[in-house]
Image (cartoon, rainbow, N blue to C red):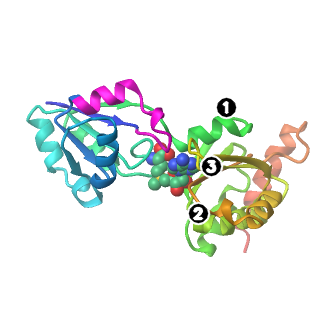
Amino acid sequence: AGTLYVVATPIGNLEDISARALRVLSEVALIAAEDTRHSARLMQHFGIATPLAACHEHNERDEGSRFIKRLLAGEDVALISDAGTPLISDPGYHLVRHCRAAGIRVVPVPGACALIAALCAAGLPSDRFIFEGFLPAKQTARRARLEELKLEPRTLIFYEAPHRILDSLEDMSAVFGSDRPALLGRELTKTFETLKGLPLGALHAWVASDDNQQRGECVVTVGGWQAPDSDAAVDANAQRVLNLLLGELP
Ligand code: SAM
């Protein structure tokens, strides 16, 4: 059988594609892409003539998909998404799962990923973190999700759409507290890249006061919950358990 290469593409700056990614994309028989028109422009830019085929939710879920057939027939296929690393808030999971189940070799070709780009410049603890992807679009569900994360001690990373960034920051500030440290990474690697680190309340106010900050793609990183009395680790744990129990009470 052939190999499925999971290839990261840039999240903005085209220089972020790796030499290995370019070689793999030009050598495979077929590129499975989220949006073939979008990826065609990228391939054209790099002078890559490999045929593209759409890989989306329903054909990706099909374990007898054309991609699996061609892989089983011995051809190599590369999987890409519109930006960054496939499978990270992007399609690809089902295809990778089917390949592994069918004994097809899956090889990652790592590169740009917005959550890692934001985290490595955030100045928040990076030894342990959790990626929450996109929050629910509706406020009730979003607040409920944030409530679940309120006592999470690890650094939190969220993706957000520009038209919801203000609402999300408002909810984060309300649930986590306005003084929780945070950083907004917007248009990372692009011309108008912004990295703004402020406590959640001030960050919300800053974004609210400038329409430009409500455009483009963004990642929000938030410092984890810290015990008010941080020299008493035991107290912190007791508080965490107590808070969880209180949350269960009617
Ligand atoms: N697979 C991508 C990755 O590896 O980061 C993520 C795809 S997801 C559909 C798109 C979201 O990623 C955006 O809404 C935004 O939250 C984040 N994102 C992607 N590119 C970004 C950039 N250049 N700057 C900030 N956030 C970005």
Of tags 3 and 1, the one toward the viewer is: 3
| Residue that badge 3 annotates | 192
| Residue that badge 2 annotates | 162
Name the outermost residue toward the left: 73
Position in image of residue 99 (x %, y %): 23, 39
Which residue type does callout 3 highlight?
Phe
Q: Earlier in the sequence, mark 3 or mark 2?
A: 2
Secondary structure beneath disc 2?
helix
Q: In the rendered image, is residue 29 in sight?
A: yes
Residue at 28% across, 35% down: 47
- Mark 2–mark 1 Cα distance, whole angstroms, equals 28 Å
144 on left or right of 34:
right
Position in image of residue 39 (x %, y %): 32, 48
Which residue type does callout 1 highlight?
Asp
| Residue that badge 1 annotates | 127
Please determine whether, in this image, residue 235 is positioned above or below residue 3. below
Position in image of residue 195 (x %, y %): 70, 45
Nearest the eye: 80 or 143: 80
93 on left or right of 116:
left
Which residue type does callout 2 highlight?
Pro
Classified by dominant secondary structure, the portion drawn in magenta counts as: helix
Q: Which residues are magenta?
A: 9-26
Evaluate if marks 2 and 1 touch, with contact meaning CB atoms under 8 Å apart: no
Residue at 55% across, 66% down: 136
Of tags 2 and 1, the one toward the viewer is: 2
Q: Earlier in the sequence, mark 2 or mark 1?
A: 1
Q: Is residue 22 magenta?
A: yes
Q: Is residue 54 magenta?
A: no
